[in-house]
Amino acid sequence: MPNRKQYLIANWKMSKTTNQAILFMQQFPVNSLNNSEIQVILAPSYVSLSILRDIILTASAPITLAAQNCSSEESGAYTGEVSVTMLREIGCQYVIIGHSERRTLFGECEPMLSKKVELAVKAGLIPILCIGESRELYETGATVEYLKQQLAPYSSTLPFLLAYEPIWSIGTGLIPTREDLSTALDAIDSKFPDTPILYGGSVNRKNISDLLCHQRMNGFLVGGASLEPDSFFALYSAMNQNNHHG
Ligand code: PGA
C-alpha cells in the first residue's frame, strides 16, 4: 500500500458553538492518542479555530485543525469570506473543500472548487476534497462514471486527500455495501494511486469495523459520530486496534 497513514476527521459542521467545542476538548482523552500513524483532525466552525489551536498547543495534543470551507478568492472585497491565508495564519493545516452540503445547499461546483484547491495548496494547506454521488446516480449504477467526472479537473500529483462521501449516506445511517465501496475506491485509486482516500457517510462505532476491512482506505470523515467525545474516541480506538492487528 502506498500510504499507510490513517486520518480520522471530525466535521462538526454548524453543530457546535465555541463553548461546546471547548467542552469537547475538556472531555476528549487526548493523552490516549498514542498512535502516530493515525492523524486526528478537528474541523470546527471558523469562529472556534483560534481557541482550539490554543487548547491543542497548551495540551501538546497530537491533533491538527481543518477549516470546513475557504474562499475561492485570495483576498479583497469579498464580504463574509475567509481566505486560505487567514486559515493558514490561524493554525489550520487542512481545509475541507466541496463537501456535499456546500455543493447541494450552496451551489458550489467545479471550477470554483478546483480554484479553492489550487489556492489552498499554494497557501500550504492540505485540501480534503469531498466527492460522492447522489442516491439517484447510485441507484442507476452511475457512481463510477460520476466520480471520474468529479475528479477530472484534478491532477494525481496534487498534495491533497480525497474523501469519498456518497450523498445518500451522509447523516442517513446507510453505508455502501462492501462491494460497492470497493468499486468506488478502486475507481478513485486508478487515477490517484498515491492519494490518501477517506470514506465519509454515517460512520459510527457499530459499522467502523466493517469499513476498516478496505485496505485501500486511509480513514474517515465523520459528522454525527464526531460530536460526542466518547463516540469519536471509539472510532479512534477501532482504527488503532485495526492498525496494530491489520
Ligand atoms: P455523517 O456526516 O457522519 O453525519 O454522515 C459525514 C459528513 O458529512 O462528512
Image (cartoon, rainbow, N blue to C red):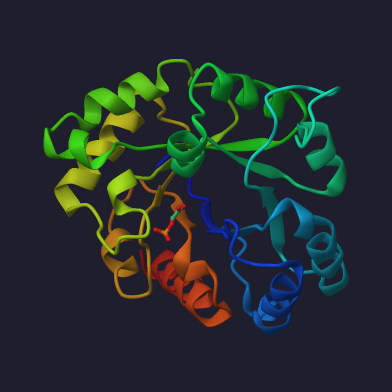
Residue 37 at what x, y percent from top left?
Answer: 57, 58
Give the residue displayed 54% in from the left and 77% down from the top.
228
In depth, the one of 121 and 47 nearer the eye is 47
Specify whether 219 is left or right of 48.
Answer: left
Give the residue displayed 37% in from the left and 59% down from the top.
171
Query: Quarter-wise, where is residue 243 in the image?
Result: bottom left
In depth, the one of 229 and 59 nearer the eye is 229
In depth, the one of 208 and 116 nearer the eye is 116
Residue found at the very far left of the displayed protein = 140
The number of numbered badges drawn on the structure is: 0
Give the residue displayed 72% in from the left and 45% down from the top.
93
The N terminus - image quarter: top left
Query: Quarter-wise, where is residue 201 in the image?
Result: bottom left
Residue 134 at what x, y percent from top left?
Answer: 28, 38
The C terminus - image quarter: bottom left
Give the residue displayed 58% in from the left and 78% down from the top.
229
Residue 97 at what x, y percent from top left?
Answer: 57, 36
Specify whether 69 is left or right of 240.
Answer: right
Ligand 1 falls in which quarter? Answer: bottom left
